[in-house]
Image: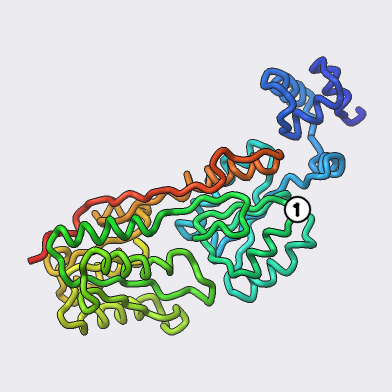
Amino acid sequence: MSRVTIHDVALEAGVSDSTVSRALRGLDRVDDSTRRKVQEASKRLHFQFSRNASSLASGKTMRVSLLLADSLNTWFDSSVLQGAYEILSPAGYDVVPSLAGTSERLDGFFDRLPSNGNVDGIMVGSINLNAAQSNILKQLSIPSVGLDSRTIDGFDASVLLDDGQAMIDAVGLLKNMGHRHIAFVGWPAPGDLQLSSQLRADTFIKAALEQGFADDEVHNLSLGKASDYRSKEDALEAAVAQLLSLYPRPTAICVETDGFAVPLIAKLRHFGIRVPEDMSVIGFDDNDLASVVGLTTIHQNPVEMARLAARKMLELMRGGQPDEPHAVVRPILMMRGTTAAAR
């Protein structure tokens, strides 16, 4: 038997060869009923569409690069990958993750980017770029979309999380519950990259000062780099030691991520600090574990944020312009069992 061709599919569907090609490539110039007819004919004939041939014909690679900070199995990055895939894959695009990890690897990625013709667009997730990297994005012939990257500089579109409002809400809650000595606890930096979550300490301090806390009533506990510790357990013990050495001791803390807040609560209780009776705790993310353990936290939805960013990317790659190129998403404060009125 001879191999099935696009022409065979066209005859089966009763359309032209070019219509088959456009329909299977996911292009917009095909109405839904025709696209379904072509897809059904292709399925009946067991036709395997050649992505490489399509790319040569269209000048498109049908690939989008998704640049992430560290690891695909973290809650945030895996959620971003899921959201981007849900939108881009049905449109015929492959999502190609790249991991920066270190500033050296991030610089290497951007050094290669201008000559990299292997993608049709680039999304950057939760990494704060420097001026040189933003300038490279401005010079690209392909669209770029930022996802929680704290700036719109260099991006054709972006989806930003309003961390400033999140911290205003968190500090306001603690103030209204009578807490007068509060602290922010940051997770040890995983490397030398600056991630969006690491900037939350500054917004927390700013929100506290603007709401009337004195300089000596609000603290920023920095735990340095993850490489400073032999294990996560060591980092937790260092955080508890810093908290208990403060005088007056904070009666409430906000923690950079839920992933650090949950084990920190367990470690505080191990050393006799009752949560929330002695110390209230607010996390950030509202990951899958937060509601299970009753953690008061700031909710964000990286899957939905990635969907929104991917829709903007599709519009840009198709030559259009999103109605709202740069969107700001407001997080939601979730009140649960790890916060209580100050005693």
Q: In the image, what residue occupies the spot 54% across and 42% down?
A: 324
Q: Secondary structure at mark 1?
A: loop
Image side of residue 12 versus residue 229, left or right: right
Q: In the image, what residue occupies the spot 18% across and 62% down?
A: 175
Q: Position of residue 239 (x, y in %)?
A: 30, 78
* Image quadrant in which the N terminus is located: top right
Residue 183 or 92: which is nearer the viewer?
183
Q: In the image, what residue occupies the spot 30% across and 71% down?
A: 184
* Image quadrant in which the C terminus is located: bottom left
Residue 206 or 85: which is nearer the viewer?
206
In terms of image quadrants, where is residue 155? bottom right
Against 91, is 141 above or below? Answer: below
How many numbered discs?
Answer: 1
- Mark 1 sits on what residue? 141
Q: Residue placed farthest to the top in the image?
A: 14
In terms of image quadrants, where is residue 173? bottom left
Q: Position of residue 258 (x, y in %)?
A: 34, 61
Q: Position of residue 143 (x, y in %)?
A: 68, 50
Q: Residue placed farthest to the right in the image?
A: 2
Neighbour tally class for label 1: few under 14, some 14-19, many 20 plus, Cα within 10 Å:
few
Residue 97 or 329: which is nearer the viewer?
329
Q: In the image, what residue occupies the spot 54% across and 64% down?
A: 127
Image side of residue 266 versus residue 9, left or right: left
Q: Residue placed farthest to the left in the image?
A: 343
Give the residue type at disc 1.
Answer: Ser
Image side of residue 102 versus residue 331, left or right: right
Residue 236 or 257: which is nearer the viewer?
257
Image side of residue 270 versus residue 12, left or right: left
